[in-house]
Each structure stands twice: as C-alpha cells, then as structure tokens.
Amino acid sequence: MTRIGKIDALDGLRGYMALWVFVTHVTTMATIQLQKYDGLGMFFANGEFAVGVFIVLSGFVITLNLQKERNAGDFYIRRILRLFPVYWICLIASVLILDLSIHVLIEFPWNAPRLMDRINYLQNSREYLVPHLLAHVFLLHGLIPDRILPSSSYAFMGQAWSLTLEWQYYLVAPLLFWFMTRIKSGLLPKIVIVLALIVMSRKSQQSSFLLSYLWLFATGGVLAHIYTQNLEGGASRWRLLGAIVLFSAITAAMKGAMMVSVVLFGVSLWAITCPYGSFVHSFSHHVLANRIAMWLGKISYGFYCSHMVAIFLCAWLLIEVAGVRDRFYFIPELILGSLALALVFSALLSRYIEIPAIEFGRQLVNKRKFVRAELVARVTP
C-alpha cells in the first residue's frame, strides 16, 4: 500500500474521532445521565480520549509534512489557511447564537449533566465579550489563565480548547522537528524527551495550554520518524509495533487512561502498515478506509468546529419552537437532528471554505517555491 493510502486511512480514523467527540457532547445535552469520569461516561460523555487521538495524529502528520516541507514560511501559510477560515466561520456563528444558547440552557426543562458548566462559560463569554473575542480570533485563548479571563479555554465554542492547543503546537513544530532530527542516536533519547514532557505537563493547570499535551504531540512525532524509516526499509514493522507498545506502556504508567488515545492511534497505524492482502491490513482498510469513514474524515474539521452550534440550535428548535417537553422524544430527536444539522454544516464548510482555502494555500506555496527557484538560478554561475 502506498504512503498516500496509509495517510488516507488515518483520515478515516480522524472522522471517527470527530464523531466520538460529537457523541460525548450530545449525550449530555440530551439529558442522558452519564458522568464524565465514571463508568460508561468515560467513553460516552468524555471526549478527552478522542481529542488525544487527534493530538497524536497531528504530531504524526505535521512531522511527515515537515520532512517534505523544510521552509517554515511555507509551513505556516499552509497551516493558517488549513485551520483559521473554517474556525472563524464557526466562531462567528457561535457568537451570533450566544444569547440563544444561554437562554435555552437556562430554560432547560430537565436536569442535564454539565448544564451549569455550560451556562457558566457562556455567561462568562458574554460578560467578557471583547477580551474573549480578541483572544479567540488569534486562537491564543489557551495561553490566558482562567484566573485572568474566566472560562478562557471554553468561551463561545467549548471544543476550541483543543484548537488553540493545535495552533500553539504549529507555532513551535518547526523548532521541535529541527531539534528531534538532530538526535541521531536512536529511540532512547526521544523516549527521554517524551518522559520529560510528561513530567512537565503535570505543572500545567490548564488543558488548553500547550505544555499540558506537548508530550502527546511529541509521541506522534517520534512514531512518524519510525514510520518513515519503515517505508524506506530502514526498520521493520515490528520496530514500529515495539515503539507503539512502549509508548502505550509509558502513557499507562504516567498518564493512566490516556493510554486509550495512544493505543487507538498506534494500533490503527500499525494495522495499515501490515502487508497488503493480510487479514490485519484488509480489516483495517474496511474499517478506516471505507466510503463512510473517508467522507467523515474529509469533513471532520468542519464537523468538529460546527457541531456545538448544531446542538444548541437543535435544542432551541425542539424546546422553544416545537415545545417538546417529553424526554422520551427529546433525546432521540436532539441526537439525530443535531447530527444531521452538523453533517450539513460541515459538508458546506468543507466544500466552500476548507477545500478552497487549502487550495489557495497550495498555490501560494508553489508561487513562493517558484520565486525561490528563480532567485537561486540567477545567483548560480
């Protein structure tokens, strides 16, 4: 299987993870009594594991990109146009429905998990509107402690706590990549770096601050280096599997349940590197690279950014417009209605915002490369 095919399969994994995050948010809004850190709620009301997979995947993919794209300016152009346009649209939508969202939560007919938390961060969003907007426009709100700006991590669109984390990582990724490539003595020093970052993460009190999850980005980056060696014939699949097992064990020992994220990504990565035609490869292809998974992967970023807008709008339509007062009907109607709405939003965002922005970034980078090539040709004797 080609390198591109393997990355495409991981896009399917990204689609599933976006859907998982949606499930953890809509179940609690639908009044299903699941607690984030208890029993089934660990998986159906807690999106941390899915976001963890996103983070490892980001560290992996960005490292592969930097192996091909050595110019930092080109890297930032692509990342800015990949991340910000869809995010800004969803941020504007979240601000526009802010009062509606607060109203529907305050008037909620039933008790729902995390209801007061959502009311609190949305009210803080309105009370400190200008500073929150300034921080969110530049995706730097994760750098501001809650004690300085209340609800800084979750204002307007709660899921954006991981987007500011992503942007913070992009800002330092070229430097981190340069540092890791200077380590030539094998896997052990890289493991030590990941261990040091895990220890440092314990000093961070805010999950949206890069230090909290830099170790997980770095884990993805190390696996990318091993994966590249595997493609080039410098290492076997078993070395990759050994590294995955090792990082999973380290995570289990030092970060507990976050091992789930490393295992999910690691198993997926290893499965798609298995020989073409093998049972493991075929199974992973059917799971990760089927049409539904690939479509979900294609729209996953817009889905992740817009799904809370869909949930709030659907809840408002059901409670305030349709007057639903029976939980028996409200639960499935909210889940299915907001899912349909989010899929429509994300498909439109993908087609009209995300894909054109990515293509524009590609064209800009190609022009920059052409100009650089011409300059080199002029000065070369």
Image: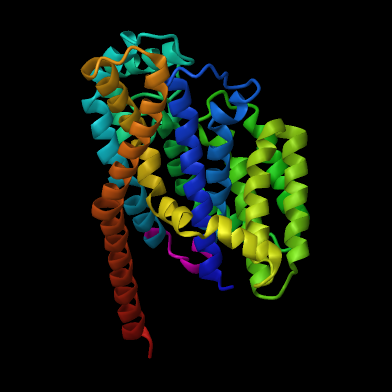
Q: Quadrant of residue 159?
A: top left
| Residue in view at x 35 percent, y 79 percent | 373
Viewport quadrant of the N terminus: bottom right
Would residue 278 be visible to someone looking at this image?
yes
Q: Is residue 148 magenta?
A: no
Viewport quadrant of the C terminus: bottom left
Residue 112 % position (x, y): 45, 13
Q: Nearer the viewer, residue 237 or 24?
A: 24
Residue 24 % position (x, y): 50, 29
Residue 137 is left or right of residue 172, and the answer is left
Q: Is residue 199 above or below residue 354?
A: above
Q: Is residue 71 magenta?
A: yes
**Magenta portion: prevailing SS class:** helix
Q: Is residue 94 above or below residue 107?
A: below
Q: Is residue 318 above or below residue 82?
A: above
The number of discs equals 0
Residue 58 % position (x, y): 52, 50
| Residue in view at x 69 percent, y 39 percent | 259
| Residue in view at x 63 percent, y 65 percent | 282
Q: Quadrant of residue 198?
A: top right
Q: Nearer the viewer, residue 210 or 360?
A: 360
Q: Which residues are magenta?
A: 65-73
Q: Quadrant of residue 6?
A: bottom right
